[in-house]
Image: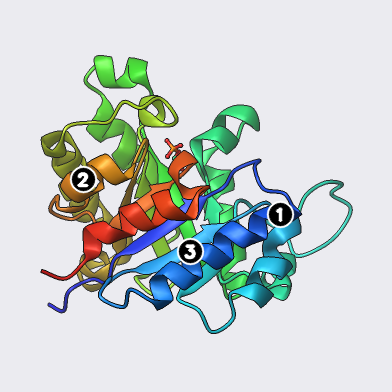
Amino acid sequence: MTAIRPLVAGNWKMNGLLSSVSEAAALAELLRSNDEIEADAMICPPATLIPLLAERLTGSRVAVGGQDCHQIESGAHTGDISAEILADAGASAVIVGHSERRADHGESDATVNAKALAAYRAGLVAIICVGETDAQRDAGETLDIVAGQLRGSVPAAAGAGNTIIAYEPVWAIGTGRTPTADDVAEVHNHMRTQLIAIVGDGESSAMRLLYGGSVKPSNATELMAVENVNGALVGGASLKADDFFGILSAYTAG
Ligand code: PGA
């Protein structure tokens, strides 16, 4: 099996002003002058910045993604944004099913599944997020919760070329707490196995599985070294080019 090329994707969430374009440009410059980093990079800024970043990052090693999309292509859905609009603005991927969307907007697995299909329809890669809450973890339900979310959220049409899975324990997001490397390994191995039933053996074994939740430069090397972890989805530490680059540096060859 050929090695899976890692991806470190930054989720800027509801952060990012016009002036933040310079952080993205700084990251692109750091990657340009440090070509020993063997990973792809992506920034998912607020939608207002997608065209600006896409233009500024053309020809760089940093791709641009959206943070959410509506299921349908266009129409009377005030405040929503479709996958087609994101693609038109210059995005190549979109995060769907982030726990903040699931919690704040009541998104179900079925909704997330429909959003992933919308991403495929628009030619975008779907970054599908799953992860257990603190209470579910304490109840020993982590593996069952994650498996259920995968079954519900990942379309049968998913494959390694159009889909990336991000395991983000809800209790680790923005808290500074992370699971142990052993815990991450257990979940990621389980996800790889569970995905076989949904997308088949070949696609499952080639699909990128990201870890997300309080990833920072100081813990990236350990977390990214875990079996079946093919990169990271990074919130807070993606806002500053130096921090983001520090995480990408976990993938320095040798
Ligand atoms: P965090 O967020 O890195 O700030 O914990 C991760 C995420 O929600 O994607």
Amino acid on which disc 2 is placed: Leu
Q: Which mark is residue 11?
A: none
Q: Secondary structure at mark 2?
A: helix
Please tell me which residue is depicted at 75% across the width and 65% down the height of the picture: 73
The N terminus appears in which quarter of the rendering?
A: bottom left
Judge depth for marks 3 and 2 and give the one in front: 3
Q: Secondary structure at mark 3?
A: helix
Say whether residue 91 is left or right of residue 4: right
Instruction: Give the CA distance from mark 1 to mark 2.
Output: 31 Å
Q: Secondary structure at mark 1?
A: helix
Mark 3 = which residue? 27
Question: Would residue 98 be seen by someone viewing this image from the given angle?
Answer: yes
Amino acid on which disc 3 is placed: Leu
Q: Which mark is residue 19?
A: 1
- CB of mark 3 near ligand 1 (< 8 Å): no
- Identify the image's colour scheme: rainbow, by chain, secondary structure or one colour: rainbow
Q: Are marks 3 and 1 in contact (CB under 8 Å)?
A: no
The C terminus appears in which quarter of the rendering?
A: bottom left
Instruction: Give the CA distance from mark 3 to mark 1.
Output: 14 Å
Q: Earlier in the sequence, mark 3 or mark 1?
A: 1
Q: Quadrant of residue 101?
A: top right
Amino acid on which disc 1 is placed: Ser
Q: Estimate how packed mark 1 is, as few (under 14), some (14 to 19) or many (20 or more) residues with alpha carbons within 10 Å.
A: few
Pick the residue in front: 248 or 78: 248
Question: Would residue 117 be seen by someone viewing this image from the given angle?
Answer: no
Mark 2 = which residue? 223
Please tell me which residue is depicted at 30% across the width and 41% down the height of the picture: 147
